[in-house]
Image: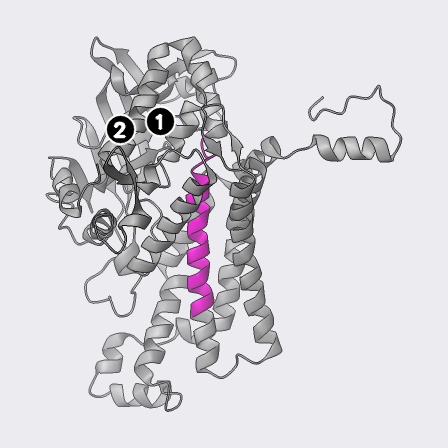
Amino acid sequence: MIRTGEEYRESLQDGREVYMDGRRVDDVTSHPQFKPLVDIRARIYDMQHEEEHREVMTFAERGERFPVGNQIPREPAHWHAKRKAVDTVMKDIGGVVTRVGDETVGEMWSLADGADILNEIDPRFAENINRHIQLAVEDDPFHVSANTDPKGDRSLKPQDQDPDMLTHVVRETDEGIVIRGAKYETAAAYSNQGFLKPTIANWGDASISDYAVGCIVRMNAPGVKHICRSGFQRDGTEQDYPLSNRFDEVDTLMILDDVLIPWEDVLFYQHTRAAAFIRTTLHRYSAMPFVQRLITYTDMMIGAALWNVKQTGLERQPAVQEKLAQLAVYREGINAHLTAAVATAEPSPGGFLMPNQSLLMTGRVHAVSNMPAMMHLARELCGGQICITPDFESFQGEETGHWLNKYYSINEYWAAEDRRKLLSFARDLLNSGYAGHRLTFHLFAQSPPFAHLAAVYRNFGWDGPLDFVKRAAGLSDNIHGKQGG
């Protein structure tokens, strides 16, 4: 059943070992670097109970309400409901959050699509996966995805260097497996559990490897330590950096120091074939909400740029309209790919409704690869004042405020305070440390750009163009037209 925000906060007060700036954090729910995002996640839980949002945020089954984000997708209406819920949350909080659970639980569905492979190894694994998928719906945990290792020397096999550079199993016990290593994961310190899976590893020809492991990690388990990067939130800068102070999703290096994973939480183990399958299909569902969030981020860029040119009276200039149109094309290109991916969705091996993979993965490439250029285009439209405007305290100062009020007031409709607020928002969106972090995050959060293109290569329908040209050019029937042949 759906949780409340207070129940979520209470679940984080479980003795977990979290560090920020080298010091132990006693309570992530009240620590200034974590509290803004904890409050947002709590807000999402509370929205599920509110009359205004209940029908959008939840679905009814067996007389109970469950979160739409965790609903197993079996028909197009489920995907439309998920998209509407994400949009509703982003509008309610006034920004973008990427790691809040709904965009990672889909990786479990990808795992279920490999049940046949897992059953060849051990039927218990497929049973564990199906149980955890159902628990995600029924218990509504904050579920994240632990993916990237520190890696070490990537030209070497894991065994030929410090073995802990890639997470691996060190021993088996009657209770489960014991793992050691480290994983990077955004929001881990204030989540409940994570799906840990192997990164892209150099297994060679090995069919069995202790590095090929997938499991559920409890964030308060003994041996789990969260070493977090320092956040962008800083007291006294809320007016100058409104996004940094509210939407910085803190990233964690999650140390796994001989952590026991009970057998019921082991999803696959040792077999590299299963691990390879997961790596190639991991985002077949989760790419949808991940990419959708870039529509909201683009709306923020368009809104900041358009308000700026309206303030300064440039919205009728053809050159300005051309740049705004480019941002609109980018935004609608993302929207079109996601809409078409649902409209042409297809059944998956696990019996789910899977977005059209060629369209979804192509949409991800379009969204992620063009994001740097679109941010720069928005910078152009916002102008150089986003990097030179004085801070809020200067606007309030007795000796400085009247001068800034004079030069930042545009006309009777646009006073200095509104001008300052818009420039501060645009600066934080496009120019700040937070903005650079978001850009890098989107480039790598669902694997690096080359892997995005590899996903397109695996899912595009190459046989259609091959067969068309074969007929149009009158090629011999003896040639092999299958891709890779």
Give the answer, above or below, for where 141 lies relative to 83. Answer: above
Mark 2 surroundings: few (<14), some (14-19) or many (≥20) residues within 10 A: some
**Who is closer to the viewer here, 216 or 284?**
284
Image quarter (top left, top right, bottom left or bottom right) of the C terminus: top right
Toward which corner of the image does residue 404 lie, by quadrant? bottom left
Helix, strand, or loop for circle 1? helix
Give the amino acid type for the residue marked by disc 2 in the picture. Leu
Q: Which residues are magenta?
A: 282-303
Query: Alpha-carbon neighbours of circle 1 within 10 Å: few (<14), some, or many (≥20)?
Result: some
Which of 347/250 is in front? 347
**How are the residues colored?**
one colour
Residue at figure coordinates x 48%, y 22% from the top left: 276
Left or right of 344 on screen, residue 426: left
Question: Of helix, strand and loop, which one carries label 2?
Answer: helix
Picture coordinates of residue 43 (x, y %)? Answer: 22, 52
Q: Find residue 222 and report its image quarter.
A: top left
> Quarter-wise, where is residue 289 in the image?
top left
Check if mark 2's residue and mark 1's residue have beta carbons within 8 Å.
no
Instruction: Quickly name the residue at label 1.
Output: 165
Going from the N terminus, do you reach mark 2 or mark 1 first? Answer: 2
Q: Position of residue 327 (x, y in %)?
A: 54, 63
Query: Which secondary structure is most common in the magenta stretch?
Result: helix
- Residue matched to label 2: 135
Q: Amino acid at mark 1?
A: Met
